[in-house]
Image (cartoon, helix red, strand yellow):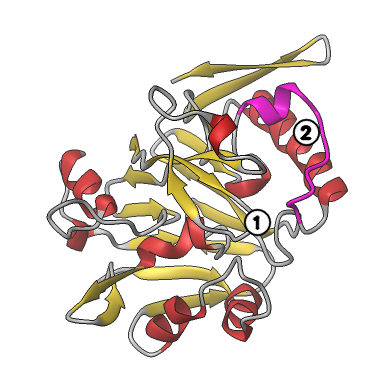
């Protein structure tokens, strides 16, 4: 098994839910009052049987009008058309924007040959347009053209890939455990988005159920430490891929 972090860079996001590129070396946080500052890291996992994408980034393009996500997959040594599975933790725009690409004024699936594993109720809620965190045009484009395997609740998608409805960050958020070829990986989406959230415990206002999400982070961290899981941190500033240890009621994350 090979694991790649497909870093899409840093962004600020304010009350309008717009993601604006932010360069920590040249831009000042003072110029963007009221903004959150995040990093975006989709992940790619190569196994003997699959090329797996974990969440899809913002869907931004480079100067050649190509998806950054596609280029990062190529930089990792693969072709985007070789992706066989897209595992989605949830469908907020910063995780789902890269599921589609605009060509000739029309949105098309970015990974037309892949199966997309999505919680059914998360997709249905995204289509309602009741939250600006979801972009309905993405789901409208996917529903009749993409190969979607809707799942409900908890289960095993295929041998070595388990999903669990966690419902902390969004109402129908899910997390994944991957146990293949002697390696164990945990992907917590936005319920364990960065190592710092293990180290400094807090309840986030941006979570659907902040107290549940805070409790889940601790549970996931302890489980990862006990079982030796590799953890993938989608919004990590520096350590996107790491191993967790837990001693004297303190978490430590070591880069892998």
Of badges 2 and 1, nearer the viewer stands 1
Residue at image position (55%, 22%) is 243
Q: Which residue is mark 2?
A: 218
Q: Would residue 158 be seen by someone viewing this image from the given angle? A: no
Q: Seen in the image, is 218 located left or right of residue 155?
A: right
Magenta run includes residue 92: no
Few, some or many C-alpha atoms within 10 Å of disc 1 (few <14, some 14-19, many ≥20)? few
Mark 1 lies on a secondary structure that is loop
Q: Which residue is mark 1?
A: 15
Name the one closer to the observer, 37 or 46: 37
Q: Seen in the image, is 225 located left or right of residue 115?
A: right
Q: How far across and down, in percent of the image, does residue 171 sit? A: 74, 66
Mark 2 lies on a secondary structure that is helix
Name the one closer to the observer, 180 or 229: 229
Q: Earlier in the sequence, mark 2 or mark 1?
A: 1
Q: Which residues are magenta?
A: 195-207
């Amino acid at each position: 098994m090979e694991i790649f972090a497909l870093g899409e860079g840093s962004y600020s996001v304010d009350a309008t839910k717009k993601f604006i590129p932010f360069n920590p070396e040249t831009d000042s946080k003072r110029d963007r009052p009221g903004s959150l500052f995040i990093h975006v890291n989709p992940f790619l996992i190569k196994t003997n049987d699959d090329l797996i994408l974990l969440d899809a980034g913002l869907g931004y393009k480079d100067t050649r009008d190509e998806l950054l996500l596609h280029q990062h997959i190529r930089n990792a040594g693969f072709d985007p058309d070789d992706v066989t599975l897209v595992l989605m933790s949830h469908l907020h725009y910063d995780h789902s924007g890269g599921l589609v690409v605009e060509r000739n004024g029309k949105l098309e699936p970015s990974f037309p040959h892949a199966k997309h594993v999505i919680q059914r109720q998360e997709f249905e809620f995204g289509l309602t347009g009741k939250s600006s965190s979801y972009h309905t045009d993405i789901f409208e484009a996917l529903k009749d053209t993409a190969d979607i395997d809707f799942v409900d609740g908890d289960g095993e998608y295929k041998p070595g890939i388990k999903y669990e409805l966690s419902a902390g960050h969004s109402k129908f958020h899910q997390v994944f455990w991957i146990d293949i070829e002697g390696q164990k990986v945990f992907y917590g989406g936005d319920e364990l988005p960065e190592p710092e959230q293990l180290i400094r415990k807090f309840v986030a206002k941006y979570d659907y159920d902040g107290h549940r999400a805070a409790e889940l982070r601790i549970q996931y961290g302890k489980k990862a430490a006990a079982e030796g899981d590799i953890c993938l941190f989608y919004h990590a500033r520096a350590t996107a891929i790491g191993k967790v240890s837990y001693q004297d009621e303190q978490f430590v994350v070591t880069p892998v």
